[in-house]
Image (spheres, rainbow, N blue to C red):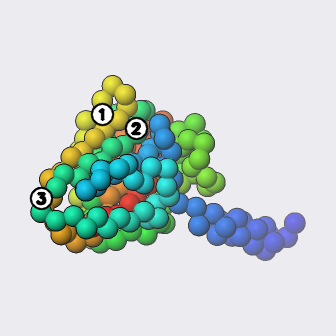
Amino acid sequence: MKLSTLASAALLLAVSGLPAQTTGVAGVNDLTMMLPPGYLPTGSGTVSCSTFVTTGATGTNVVAFSLDAPTASATFLLISPLGCVPQYFPFLPSAAPTCAGPAAGTPLTNLWLSLVAGGPFPLAVPGIINSAGMTRWNFSLGWPIPPLYVQGLMLDFCSPTTFKFSQAMGFQ
């Protein structure tokens, strides 16, 4: 095979993987949000930047997030008002399938930051992992609010880089 053909095939393979984005995998790296007024679980199992919820809430309400992270040693909720781009920053190498979960896709993309960074954002809020491998954050917010985007970050020795991300979502 000629070198140019090999390079073209490698480029095609790399470009064909770009539509892949971080997927929330239950029991691995899944972020769920519960928003007023109904507090129904939203966003579980989705891909980054595909979930945006407008609640229509007014006054002060609690917003809750839960993150599946059973193999993590620490968790953080990243928050940014600057937007969400599915392939904003791909950290490489990708995690192993056992770490990423069966629905993570190819290439395995749970090392992709989807929140747009700038200034002090994304803001990282630490969490406490419970015995079930889940972290929960509750925030009391005054509504209406501008759009906010969130993504879970886990310090996890299962990953070759010792960290991984959940899917990113937004709400207002």
**Mark 3 in CB contact with mark 1 (< 8 angstroms):** no
**What residue appears at the point 75 percent right and 72 percent down from the top-left corner?**
8
**Mark number, residue 129:** 1
**Mark 2 in CB contact with mark 1 (< 8 angstroms):** yes
Q: Which residue is mark 3?
A: 60
Q: Which residue is mark 2?
A: 69
Q: Nearer the viewer, residue 55 or 75?
A: 55
Q: Residues within 10 Å of mark 1 (few under 14, many from 20)?
A: many
Q: Is residue 152 visible?
A: no
**What residue appears at the point 31 percent right and 67 percent down from the top-left corner?**
54
Residue 106, percent from left and from top: 63, 54
Classify mark 1: helix, strand or loop. loop
Query: Mark 1 or mark 3, which is nearer the start of the sequence?
Result: 3
Classify mark 3: helix, strand or loop. strand
**What residue appears at the point 42 percent right and 54 percent down from the top-left corner?**
43
Q: Residues within 10 Å of mark 2 (few under 14, many from 20)?
A: many
Residue 67, percent from left and from top: 36, 43
Q: Nearer the viewer, residue 93 or 20?
A: 20
Q: CA distance from mark 3 to mark 1?
A: 27 Å
**What residue appears at the point 38 percent right and 66 percent down from the top-left corner?**
52
As drawn, 120 above or below 103 = below
Query: Mark 1 or mark 2, which is nearer the start of the sequence?
Result: 2
Residue 130, percent from left and from top: 30, 30
Amino acid at pointer 2: Ala
As drawn, 54 above or below 23 = below
Q: Residue furthest top?
A: 131
Query: Mark 2 or mark 3, which is nearer the start of the sequence?
Result: 3
The quarter of the rendered structure image containing the C terminus is: bottom left
